[in-house]
Image (spheres, rainbow, N blue to C red):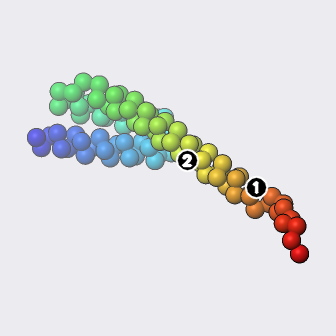
Amino acid sequence: MKIQRIIYFAAGAAVGYLAGSAAGRERYDAIVSQLNSVADRAGVPDFGSRLADRTVDVARTATDAAGDLIDAAADKATGTVEDITKPKKASGKS
């Protein structure tokens, strides 16, 4: 049970680092290799590779969701600007 917690903590730390890192591919490969080594000793083969693949999936999903939110905000802003700049009709009353 304690090993599982350690693996989960290390995986979480690695995911956070990989998601926010600008260290490049060489460092990424080193982290995945270290994760695989630790996971192999714990009896979980290809853990680092599967975790890396899942991290990419999560990043793509987050990027898509952010793009959708930005599109919706842009549409709303465009509508607001059009409403503000639209000429008002004269009511004909004096």
The answer to which of 1 and 25 lies nearer the viewer is 1
| Name of the residue lying farthest toward the top | 45
Question: Which image quadrant is residue 38 in?
Answer: top left
Q: CA distance from mark 1 to mark 2?
A: 20 Å
| Name of the residue lying farthest toward the front | 93
Left or right placement of residue 9 versus residue 31 in this view = left
Whether residue 15 is visible: yes
Report which residue position mark 1 lands on.
82
Check the picture and name the quadrant holding the C terminus: bottom right
Compare marks 1 and 2 and give the one earlier in the sequence.
2
Report which residue position mark 2 lands on.
69
Left or right placement of residue 8 versus residue 16 in this view = left
The answer to which of 78 and 17 lies nearer the viewer is 78
Disc 1 crowd rating (10 Å Cα; few below 14, some 14-19, many 20+) is few
Image coordinates for residue 89, horizontal then vertical, percent: 84, 61
The amino acid type, in three-letter code, at marker 2 is Leu
Q: Residue at x 27, y 43 (%)?
A: 10
Q: Residue at x 37, y 42 (%)?
A: 15
| Name of the residue lying farthest toward the left | 1
Image coordinates for residue 87, horizontal then vertical, percent: 84, 60
Image coordinates for residue 66, horizontal then vertical, percent: 53, 45
The amino acid type, in three-letter code, at marker 1 is Glu
